Amino acid sequence: MRISVLTEADPAEPRVASVPETVKKFVGLGGEVVVQSGAGANAGVPDSEYEAAGAKIAGSAEEALSGADLVLKVRRPNAEELGKIGKGATVVAIMDPYGHEDALKAMADAGVNAFAMELMPRITRAQVMDVLSSQANLAGYRAVIDGAAEYGRSLPMMMTAAGTVPAARIFIMGVGVAGLQAIATARRLGAVVTATDVRPATKEQVESLGAKFVAVEDEEFKSAETSGGYAKEMSAEYQKKQAELVKGHIAKQDIVITTALIPGRPAPKLVSEEMVASMKPGSVLVDLAVERGGNVAGAKAGEIVTVGNGVKIVGHTNVPGRLAATASALYARNLYAFVETLIDKESKSLAVKWDDELVKATNLTRDGQVVHPNFQPKA
């Protein structure tokens, strides 16, 4: 069983799909691990550490992929990489399938068995494989650090001989994994924290972290969560009421962090131009949904925009990648936990159980076809 770990082709992706810790485990399962030279360089892992863990180093992607049974990546393979992956090989990565039907067809046409880690079901046995949570957790932490860096003032209240410095006010919009970590980080840094979400279950979580919950708590709010734990799209009437409440609140905030995403849809607009204009000069908005269209009016992917009133809108892309070493270590563990279920311990070979619920939930392409029910080509 030959396992290949590639250097990510996208120069904006510093993460790597395997680290020495997981390489050792794959070798222990009987795998021959081949790592492309430089794969871990941007995540602080030199080739020598992979070699010490039992991997072979390949000088090129072509060499790394030669004879590969299993290919591990952070992002889905591009056309050039697909041309080098053997037919029938299994590829596991964060595939970003929504809206990319052409890319799925290309993987099917290449004859690879593709698995999307971000489609992992939210069930107990899959918690250790949940890449959305592991990466969002880091994004929430980093959003506060990035917001604080752009804010230019201290976050905690400070009592000094020269007078008292008030605590910064931080508002978190969207209390999923990223939002909860943002609340915890902002609280640890001494800010006064408030948060909002359309899911009623989050109120208790917000308050347990020492923050104040802000939301219109009507009947629609009480049923605003899917069985999978995601937020539902709210009615126009609710959105209007919530926007009115948030509008007055945002004007008093120093840092606003938005994290709201609905799987497979553009990010909901939460902060209007009028709300941005109401904020004090020097205030900061950090939009974690900018790659999906953004929650904040005026946010631009990959840019920090300063609007007319001196408010900054931070639109960093791939925020987990801004903590590449930690993000890679967590992602590699998620990946290993899933891949381990695809390996037969006796024969030390890939033996995918196609009827397993984890496999069915994550398998995008097989035998030259797009097989996932959510991504079937339209007739």
Image: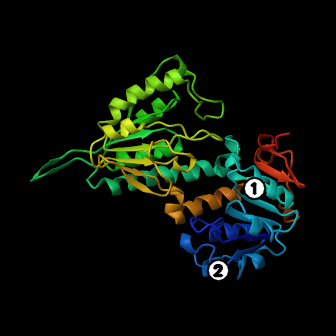
Helix, strand or loop for disc 2: helix
Location of residue 66 by image quarter = bottom right
Instruction: Give above or below for 43 relative to 337.
Output: below
Q: Does 288 sit left or right of 13 as displayed? A: left
Q: Quadrant of the C terminus?
A: top right
Instruction: Give above or below for 21 relative to 270.
Output: below
Q: Residue at x 63, y 68 (%)?
A: 19
Asked if labels 1 and 2 touch by Cβ distance under 8 angstroms, the answer is no
Helix, strand or loop for disc 1: helix
Q: Residue at x 51, y 45 (%)?
A: 294
State the residue position of label 2.
52
Circle nearer the N terminus (2, 1): 2
Q: Residue at x 70, y 82 (%)?
A: 59
Q: Position of residue 47 (x, y in %)?
A: 62, 80
Mark 1 residue type = Ala
Give neighbour class at mark 1: few <14, some 14-19, many 20+ (Cα, 10 Å): some
Instruction: Give above or below for 160 relative to 45.
Output: above
Nearest the camera: 241 or 34?
A: 241
Location of residue 347 by image quarter = bottom right
Q: Position of residue 56 (x, y in %)?
A: 72, 80
Mark 2 residue type = Ala
Nearest the camera: 219 or 124?
A: 219
State the residue position of label 1.
103
Q: Position of residue 300 (x, y in %)?
A: 48, 52
Query: Is residue 324 in sight in this rendering?
Result: yes
Q: Does 305 sit left or right of 37 as displayed? A: left
Q: Farthest residue to the front: give it.
A: 308
Q: Residue at x 49, y 48 (%)?
A: 288
